[in-house]
Image (cartoon, rainbow, N blue to C red):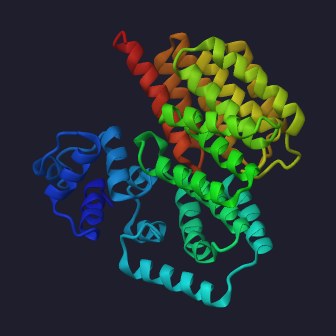
């Protein structure tokens, strides 16, 4: 399906006119669009640039990956379960939620087992697939929030759900991260409170998105508890990435050293879960951080250390490391080579394994090359 047809179908599914879609984008982002511009998209007179794809993703509440790949309609509809634009799907989810309430729903231990499964699945599945699965669980768990422990479960599910949206639009992902933090607070569980904030901080900081929000979550996590934990570890690295992107090299390096000390105390033995930070994964964090700081020697060392232990079953993270190398090339002055190297690595990964974060890293490399080319 062409991108124009996809935009038209998304708009009509919400019952919006072309003018209404333009107005929603303008209200959220001050884009200055009009009905004729939207009509041009739908008639394929012009293709939305990356910025407008992010805007469309936010206002139409659809994963950016769906727009970028312009998938066939049957795949598109499958991937949109839980986004509330298809009344039949919404009805099914509501029915499932109330049925769970009447039946008592899964026990806290069963929910913890579900979380463990989703943590593992996140490492290899695409964003749209995870979004579809987790959205149904959120409908169910919200019927059971009469136990503090289930507020903790809900907060971690919300954090995972947030990661299926692009952080760069500053809207949908941040909304869910905020909700996750509030749910964790309801649980009274400081470990959950620190973890969801730390996970939000590293997701946004690593993506280079909504840096003020990333800083806020990181600062909150560190204020709740300075006891070494995976949540504190990710908060520190999220803050470090934010500092690096702002050009604050001294702070970024200081935080990286602190993160290493925390990792030494709490690093994970589990290799393949989003709820774990083993040696290879902390080196993925370090690889991008050092690439952003222009420390090529340190970045390459981190990449080599990550590859030495990275499970073969997780090719997406190997692609992350290749994109970090592309960024290093672009930063060093080989702008075309950096873009080509990174794009080749991304193209080698099957599309169904792509993540929103990879796409945003690719955009960062393009921006680095374009900025250098214009003297910015």
Q: Is residue 125 visible?
A: no
- Name the residue rendered at 17%, 40% in the picture: 32
Does 118 sit above or below residue 202?
A: below
Position of the C terminus, as image quadrant, is top left
| Location of residue 84 by image quarter | bottom left
Residue 310, horizontal then vertical, whole percent: 79, 40
Side of 38 where 173 appears, left or right = right
The number of callouts visible is 0
Location of residue 260 in the rendering, given as x and y in whole percent from the top left corner:
81, 26
Q: Is residue 133 above or below residue 196?
A: below
In depth, the one of 38 and 60 nearer the eye is: 60
User: In which quadrant will I find the N terminus?
Assistant: bottom left
Q: Which image quadrant is residue 139 in?
A: bottom right
Residue at figure coordinates x 56%, y 48% from the top left: 355
Residue at image point 74% right, 64% down:
117
Q: Is residue 60 left or right of residue 268?
A: left
Image coordinates for residue 367, horizontal then vertical, percent? 42, 25
């Amino acid at each position: 399906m062409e991108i124009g047809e996809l935009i038209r179908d998304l708009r009509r599914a919400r019952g919006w006119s072309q003018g209404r879609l333009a107005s929603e984008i303008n209200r959220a982002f001050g884009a200055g669009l009009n009905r004729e511009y939207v009509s041009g998209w739908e008639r394929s007179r012009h293709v939305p640039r990356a910025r407008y794809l992010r805007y469309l993703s936010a206002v139409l509440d659809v994963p950016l990956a769906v727009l970028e790949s312009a998938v066939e309609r049957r795949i598109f509809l499958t991937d949109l379960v839980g986004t509330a634009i298809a009344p039949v799907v919404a009805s099914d989810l509501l029915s499932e939620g109330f049925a769970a309430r009447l039946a008592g729903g899964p026990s806290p231990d069963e929910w913890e087992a579900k979380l463990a499964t989703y943590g593992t699945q996140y490492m290899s599945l695409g964003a749209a697939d995870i979004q579809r699965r987790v959205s149904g669980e959120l409908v169910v768990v919200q019927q059971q929030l009469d136990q503090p422990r289930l507020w903790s479960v809900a907060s971690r599910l919300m954090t995972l759900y947030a990661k299926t949206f692009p952080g760069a639009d500053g809207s949908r992902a941040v909304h869910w991260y905020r909700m996750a933090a509030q749910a964790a607070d309801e649980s009274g569980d400081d470990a959950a409170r620190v973890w969801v904030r730390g996970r939000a901080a590293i997701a946004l900081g690593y993506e280079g998105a909504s840096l003020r929000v990333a800083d806020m979550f990181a600062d909150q996590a560190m204020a709740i508890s300075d006891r070494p934990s995976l949540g504190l570890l990710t908060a520190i690295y999220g803050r470090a990435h934010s500092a690096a992107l702002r050009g604050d090299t001294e702070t970024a390096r200081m935080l990286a050293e602190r993160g290493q000390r925390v990792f030494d105390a709490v690093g994970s033995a589990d290799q393949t879960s989003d709820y774990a930070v083993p040696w290879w994964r902390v080196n993925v964090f370090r690889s991008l951080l050092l690439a952003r700081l222009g420390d090529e020697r340190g970045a390459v060392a981190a990449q080599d250390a990550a590859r030495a232990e990275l499970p073969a079953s997780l090719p997406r993270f190997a692609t992350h490391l290749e994109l970090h190398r592309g960024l290093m090339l672009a930063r060093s002055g080989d702008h075309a080579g950096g873009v080509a190297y990174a794009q080749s690595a991304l193209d080698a990964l099957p599309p169904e394994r792509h993540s929103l974060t990879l796409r945003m890293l690719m955009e960062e490399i393009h921006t680095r090359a374009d900025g250098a080319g214009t003297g910015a």
